[in-house]
Amino acid sequence: MDISFELIFVSLIDGLLLGFVYGIAAMGMTLIWGVMDVINLSHGPIIALGMFGVYLAFNSFGWNPYLIIVIVALAGLLLGMLIYGIAVHRVINAPHLSTLLATFSINLIIIGIGTAAFSTAPRNVDFTLGNFSIGPITLLWTRVIAALLAILATGSLYFFLYKTRPGRYVRAVANNRKAAELVGVPSTKILALSFGLGTMLAAFAGGLISTFFPFTILSGGAYELKSFVIGVLGGLGNPVGALVGGLILGMLEGVIPAFMPTTWVPVIEFVLFVIILLVRPSGIFGAKE
Amino acid sequence: MKKWQNYFGLGVALLAILGITLWPTITGNAYNREVAFNILRVIALASSLNILLGYTGYVSFGHIVFYGFGGYVGFFFITAVGWSLWPAMLAGGISAGLLAYLLGKAVLRLRGAYFALATIGVNEAMRAFINNFEPFGGPVGMTMNFSVYQDYGGPLEALSMAFYVMAGITALVIITSYLVRSSKFGLGLLAIREDEDAAEVMGVIAPNAKTWAYVLSAIFPGIIGVLFFFKQGNVEPQPAFLLHTSIEWLVMVMLGGQGTVLGPMLGAFGYQQMRGYLLTNDFFKNIQLSVSGGLLLVVVLFVPAGVIGWIRQRFPRLRRILQ
């Protein structure tokens, strides 16, 4: 195969831009894990709901997709808090199997209703901002903006976690729930808020993806699996690690197809995933315990 | 203590298997036989998973990897090498067991959610690999020539034979599950489930016990995979390694009651019946998944021990019967 460095460079940039969005999705998953030790198996369907939210509002009202994404993200926050109240709170201290199955049942419910309402036919948001070129590289504006928004979202999350009172509460609960309760942190509210933030990021990522990829109601599953891989790459519970993990995954997806068939990408991703879990479960950046 | 009472629970379970096997034989209805085949299949799969999940407490989300992998290996031997079904089933079981042994040495070091995630990763990696593996047909999988069925007296006879073989395997799984539960090995597993560190202090060699539990729970899905794909006549990577199916087995174990012999049987039977009903009902067929999800949520939140577990808690006298 003739490998031109220009081609690799272009796919690398493309992959990196996509990686920011993957990172946001994974950040939602890893935040929930970090705060309450729950692996949210309804993450994928919520990403898909984010996609469909943008699709429906764009087609019915013709609003700007980026405005819709903000609304979809807020809806994601509320939905997450609702899911926490219904499905997670009762089993938050039970063994992992309970929370895994509780969130999986939410997954089934959303997918069931979604399939009945939208079928599994592929959709796309018919929206384009054109592209631009710098030297040999041509990039889609939608992807560049998605990456910029992803960086903005990460910044806002950090501002929230480190500079605001509820954010400090979230970190306190993540650190030691019992101790946080003892000093008067309303832990139930904070857990619900954290879960909501996680699903908000999922819905946000879904909305961003919908501006450049076609999707179905089942598409979220693939991004959920990517979120697991990224979360483990960056260290579960570490939001910045998730962003870096997302970039690594995006880069791999950009570069690997230059050397071997695209179908080998998931093999490499998941083998890497299992190996990292085995040799360094805290992630390659070693999140603090 | 009377000795026969100890076997009462096993007797109940085996009678139930016999009943499900005889039902289509007596009614002589081919459709009923298909239904019964699937019920027996999921009972066997859920009970296999229960050896790891229920007794040892390790949540294997991607357990279907053994079903798919064993099935693929056996199918390959039937179609490409020309073996008959029996050695192929053996090969499927052994290869699944071997895979579990090798994996177990590595992934069973992980605990809780990390283990669950690793099993998902293993399944996805295997599916993606088989998808690219040309000897196994890559993305299109493998198809069996119908002439293969002639060795068993024709397609109809082969189907009928597959059903009785399935019933035999299911009975074998139940007996294994029962023997494990009532053995010293099984007690070790239960101790690991309750507190792994304490179990090690008490002299349970946890890494070995866990690995063998993993191997035992993998062998049967491997064998069943071969039989199922033989009956289907084809095998494809997508359905053979479907994570969703794997999680359904977990749901069955949870519904009936993890850690008991009867629980996974009842859960598998109930779940399969409910799914069949929902899929054929005009009102529910479109939101079938949502109804299953809602039911699962209710069980997880309010009856975490499952049906059999709940009865055992409420009526201690029945514990000997409802093993």
Image: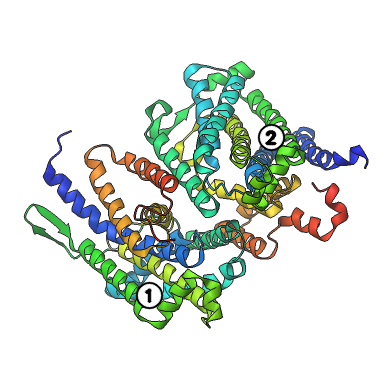
Question: Which residue in the protein does label 1 denote?
Answer: A161
Mark drawn on residue A263: none
Mark drawn on residue B30: 2
Residue type pointed to by label 1 = Leu
Q: Residue at x 31, y 65 (%)?
A: A208
Q: Nearer the viewer, residue A169 or B83?
A: A169
Q: Residue at x 64, y 45 (%)?
A: B200
Figure colour scheme: rainbow
Circles 1 and 2 in contact, beta carbons < 8 Å: no
For mark 1, give the secondary structure.
Answer: helix
Can marks 1 and 2 be said to lie on one chain?
no
The image quadrant that residue A104 belongs to is: bottom right
Q: Residue at x 71, y 29 (%)?
A: B164
Q: Position of residue B250 (x, y in %)?
A: 61, 50
Q: Position of residue B32 (x, y in %)?
A: 70, 39
Q: Quadrant of the C terminus of chain A?
A: bottom left
> Dot 2 falls on which chain?
B
> Dot 1 falls on which chain?
A
For mark 2, give the secondary structure.
Answer: helix
Label 1 and label 2: CA atoms lie apart by: 62 Å
Tell me the mark number nearer the camera, choosing from 1 and 2: 1
Q: Quadrant of the N terminus of chain A?
A: top left
Camera sees residue A140: yes
Residue type pointed to by label 2 = Ala
Q: Position of residue A32 (x, y in %)?
A: 46, 66
Q: Nearer the viewer, residue A20 or A278?
A: A278
Q: Residue at x 40, y 47 (%)?
A: A276
- Classify mark 2: residues with Cα within 10 Å, few (<14), some (14-19) or many (20+): some
